[in-house]
Amino acid sequence: MYLPVILGTAREGRESEKVARFVLELVKRSGAGAELIDARDYRIAATNNTGAIPEAKKLAEKITKADGIIIVMPEYNHGFSGELKMMLDLLYKEYANKPVAICGVSAGPLGGARGVQALKLTLLALRLQPILETVYFPNVQELFNEQGEIKDRAYEQRVLGMVEGLVKQIANKK
């Protein structure tokens, strides 16, 4: 089982990187193969979004072999980052019917809930299958210590439950 974790922002000082690394570690602990796919590595010019560019080929290799996908996305102005949208738009057929889990991240109390809802519409248009289990990380700047370790251990069970839901969805489609 291969479940890559997409970090959906390229901003400097991004708090969501702590969330992505936390989720990645838990996915690996669950026994699945995983790696971090960082939006920083897929930055392209706005008009250069064809499947023929090197970034698209690199992403296609990872997504094609993925059984499912986990996206960690911070909420920006009630939406999701432009970098994530451009990265997702690099591909289409490779996403067909792949289950996807989402972790919303925000500096506010809702944990990115509005951005998650906006992202789900895009994922459906790309023929991905968002699962019901979603984990929200509100007030992210307070959730991790200076070493990047989560303070509230209850998030471990939440993320592992989401991973379990993703694995069940993958099993059901086979």
Image (cartoon, helix red, strand yellow):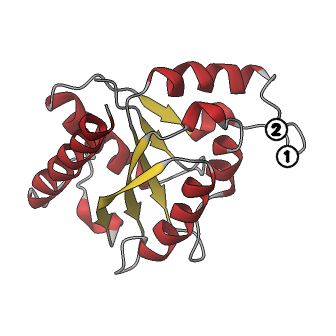
Q: Residue at x 90, y 43 (%)?
A: 47
Q: Quadrant of residue 45?
A: top right
Q: Amino acid at mark 2?
A: Asn
**Residue reaching furthest bottom?**
109
Residue 10 at x, y percent in the picture: 60, 46
Quadrant containing the N terminus in the rendered view: top left
Q: Quadrant of residue 21?
A: top left
56 lies left or right of 67 = right
Q: Amino acid at mark 1?
A: Ala
Crowdedness of circle 2 by 10 Å Cα count: few (<14), some, many (20+)? some
Q: Which residue is mark 1?
A: 46
Element at badge 1?
Answer: loop
Q: Nearer the viewer, residue 13 or 118?
A: 118
Residue 174 at x, y percent in the picture: 31, 31
Contact check, label 1 and label 2, Cβ < 8 Å: yes
Q: Residue at x 36, y 79 (%)?
A: 110
Q: Residue at x 28, y 47 (%)?
A: 148
Q: Residue at x 34, y 24 (%)?
A: 2
Residue 58 at x, y percent in the picture: 63, 20
Query: Which of the numbered marks, if any, corresponds to residue 120?
Result: none
Q: Nearer the viewer, residue 141 or 91?
A: 91
Please tell me how many numbered marks the rendered image carries. Answer: 2
Q: Which one is in front in this view, the residue at disc 1 or the one at disc 2?
A: 2
Q: Quadrant of residue 91?
A: top right
How far is mark 1 from mark 2, CA to CA?
A: 7 Å
Q: Which residue is mark 2?
A: 49
104 lies left or right of 74 = left
Crowdedness of circle 1 by 10 Å Cα count: few (<14), some, many (20+)? few
Q: Nearer the viewer, residue 110 or 59?
A: 59
Element at badge 2?
Answer: loop
